[in-house]
Amino acid sequence: MTRVIFATLFCFGTLSAMVWADDPAQVNDTAVRDAVSRSLPFLEEEGVAWMKDHGCMSCHHVPFLLWSHRSAQAQGFTVDAQKLTEWDEWTRKDSLANRILFRLRNYDLGRPEAATLPLAVKDKLKPLILRAFQTEAEFLAELTPLLTEDEMKAHRATVLKISERTVDIFDRVGGGLEALGPLLIASQGTASVLTQPEFRDGVIDLMSQIQLADGSWTTGGQFAGMRRWTLPTATQATTMWTTLALASYDTPDPKRSASIQKAIAYQRQQTPNPDNREWLAMRLLFERRFGSDEEVAKLRRQLLDARNGDGAWGWEKGVPSDALTTGLVIYVLVKVRAGDDSSVFRDARKWLLASQQSDGSWLTPAKNFTKSTDPERLRVRDEIYHYWGTAWAVIGLLETLGKSGS
């Protein structure tokens, strides 16, 4: 159940922006720091509650709890280091618990692919039923003692085939790609346990394992299942975030490099979707890392031209401005640094600071993003987008400190 009642009129932000339009003090760095200070307690309370109530990191709560607080810490805000350590460790354990690539079910023994398995072999496999294994090596280590040498030679491939879990839209392997990508990006360069080789290299290896032959990664439920996105656009978004996450580390690794090159080749073959402003922002960041200056300049201009009249962005052409997209866009523009965007940042700040709620959060109505019209589903998704939008607003605002000319 959402913890903050979704009752305040969303037009409040627009009305407030009109009042503040001619007052530079309302959008200077001091005002931004005050806004972030009021947001961090909301992000902590709701993020920790998500851990306790849902037991999963998700792609919209825990990674952005960590990202927002680490960004604040980097900008000189006082952040409880012990809490960060505890959140990191919780996240690490959750990710490891969900790295399931092999699991044998009773159902699998009845599949057509298992028809060649003798009943005696099927009976020997019962100790493996529903046990989760993160790698093929781990699975084989438990399988080998159960079968004779001849049985292993004859049936090893079949048992592996029926036990391997196919990655699809509803899988949360390692916590889900939409969660793992932001985690790697947000923690890079910090002392977090998530940057240590034991965890980081495992995530990178996992990403390489589940990359599809065409170089893409299967999108998760948030992008394709809940959002009003086409599947190709969602797959591109997941692939771009994952590629950027892999590229955030420069440790020599042929497998990682090969994954990046395959993903770049895939992305070059896809149809652009600039009307989706989130896609456009991500593509700009992607091209800044892997493309040409000419392409960066073109995409930046498209993104600037996509602003609404209030100086902020909605996720799609023709929709109202929202905190999630606006925060993401200004984060990207700062990272790209392809021109003087100080006036752009001032306008975006004006809209964000005017639309912030009294509890430090930003209302981000799910109905503006999702496919569903069911009131109950929208109520649940309001909680998700309320948090997600607030986190992106904070991350974006933090990036503009010292860069708005005010």
Image (tube, rainbow, N blue to C red):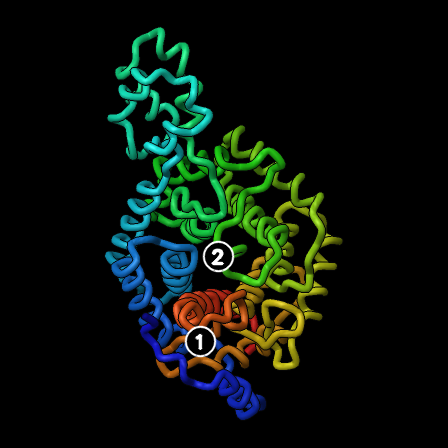
36 in relation to 89, above or below: below
The residue at which mark 2 appears reads as: 222
Nearer to the camera, 125 or 68: 125
In the image, 171 versus 406, the foreground residue is 171
Estimate the spatial distance between the alpha carbons at disc 1 and disc 2, rounded to whole Å.
20 Å
Residue at 49% x, 87% y: name it: 12
Label 2 SS? helix
Residue 373: percent from left, percent from top: 50, 71
Tags 1 and 2 in contact by the CB under 8 Å rule? no
- In front: label 1 or label 2: 2
Crowding near the residue tagged with mark 2, few <14, some 14–19, many ≥20 C-alpha atoms within 10 Å:
some
Q: Which residue is mark 1?
A: 362
| Residue type indicated by callout 2 | Gln
From the top left corner, tell me how far across and down residue 262 is, in percent.
62, 36
Q: Report helix, strand or loop for mark 1.
A: loop
- Quarter of the image for the N terminus: give it: bottom left
Q: Is residue 21 above or below residue 367?
A: below
Say whether disc 1 or disc 2 marks the residue closer to the N-terminus: 2
Q: Quadrant of the C terminus?
A: bottom right
Amino acid type of the residue that numbered disc 1 sits on in the rendered structure:
Trp
Mark seen at residue 304: none
Residue 248 drawn at (x, y percent): 51, 45
- Residue situated furthest top in the rendering: 150
* Residue 387 shows in this picture: no
Residue under the image location 49 percent in, 36 percent down: 210
